[in-house]
Amino acid sequence: MSAARPLTTLRALAVTATLPLLLSACGYGSQAEKGDAKTSASPAADTKKLSASEVRIGYFPNLTHATALVGIQEGLIARELGGTTIKPQTFNAGPSEIEALNGGSLDIGFIGPSPSINGYVKSKSTNLRIISGSASGGVKLVVNPATIKTPDDLKGKKIATPQKGNTQDVAFLNWIADKGWKVDPESGKGDVSVVRTDNKVTPDAFKQGSIDGAWVPEPTASKLVSEGASVLLDETDLWPDKKFVITNVIVSQKFLKEHPDVVEAVLRGTVKTNEWINAHPDQAKASANTALKTLSGKELEPAVIDPAWKSILVTDDPLATTLKTESDWAVKAKLIEQPDLTGIYDLTLLNKVLKAAGKPEVTDAGLGTK
């Protein structure tokens, strides 16, 4: 598998201030070492002309979208595009990003596995393709330590997830089912009350006592911990090899067909971005934090960004077998019917880029185009 080293191995960097957790806007300034980023692109990348004058790239301003945050921030993706302009767009939720892709206002996006599956199935496999991985990990179950000390203590408690049917919601419902507890997937009512709560308001809900914990991505989990919660479970520990897809790179099938050279250039940029994050961990963390400051007016304080950053792995590998598992969980929870995911992946261009870079190719787990 082609993956950067886990961010757990990276050196900590203290950066100041706080952040509302989900935002909307784009583009950032950085105190990272720009010179190093510039040298990663070939001279030809600055001048070559590609088949599209612009590419519209969507992502969430979350640390689990570190490849997009840092790649755009540092110009690593733009350099591979030469004269093709990046038009960044940010989203607060997967459905809105899929809607933009469906509506033709977005070409390429960074997004989680559940909306990728839903978008693919609802379009009867005509809408998108997953073309790369981006991140693994970065999801935790955090709780009020005064009332919840063991997993069994969750029974009868109110636990937040970001949205019905989203990646964390599906994972939590599966975990509940494995414990033999019953929860209605539509209402969230049952042995545990699953409270679908926007990540922006989850910290306030926790402080007010209206929820007892949350199964959430970073940096929401670490924000809650900074305000008194404790980590009961890191989802990474539930997976073989401690890896699972949290962020994919997707593309409009129409854009892929019409502009494969642009898609390939973006993928060269994402691969180089993951390399740069690995080689410059402190600067990469600062870059992401400066990005978030531009978006919100505030940075993540060290108590939040340090543990959050350590729990995320940037990776070129889409970890396709784990997407299939997450799809099976959604079926088991009766949130979706059994989907046919054949063709959801097209890793041809990614593997071309990886091969050219001397890296191992990655697999689509039998779910690729034919």
Image (cartoon, rainbow, N blue to C red):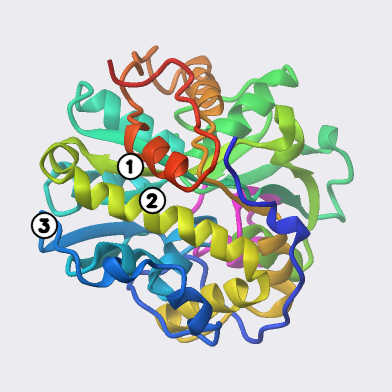
Q: Secondary structure at mark 2?
A: strand
* Mark 2: amino acid: Phe
Q: Using the rendered view, name the quadrant where residue 52 is placed.
A: bottom left
Q: Which residue was labeled with disc 1?
A: 250
Is the residue 365 above or below the residue 104 in the image? above
Q: Nearer the viewer, residue 280 or 341?
A: 280
In terms of sequence position, does the residue under pointer 3 or pointer 1 come before the other?
A: 3
User: The magenta stretch spans which residues?
Assistant: 196-219
Is the residue 190 above or below the residue 55 in the image? above
* Mark 3: amino acid: Ala
Residue 264 is one of the magenta-drawn residues: no
Badge 3 density bin: few <14, some 14–19, many ≥20, Cα 10 Å = some
Q: Which residue was labeled with disc 2?
A: 110
* Callouts 3 and 2 close, C-beta under 8 Å: no
Q: Which residue was labeled with disc 3?
A: 52
Q: Residue at x 35, y 35 (%)?
A: 130
Q: Nearer the viewer, mark 3 or mark 1?
A: 3
Q: CA distance from mark 3 to mark 2?
A: 20 Å
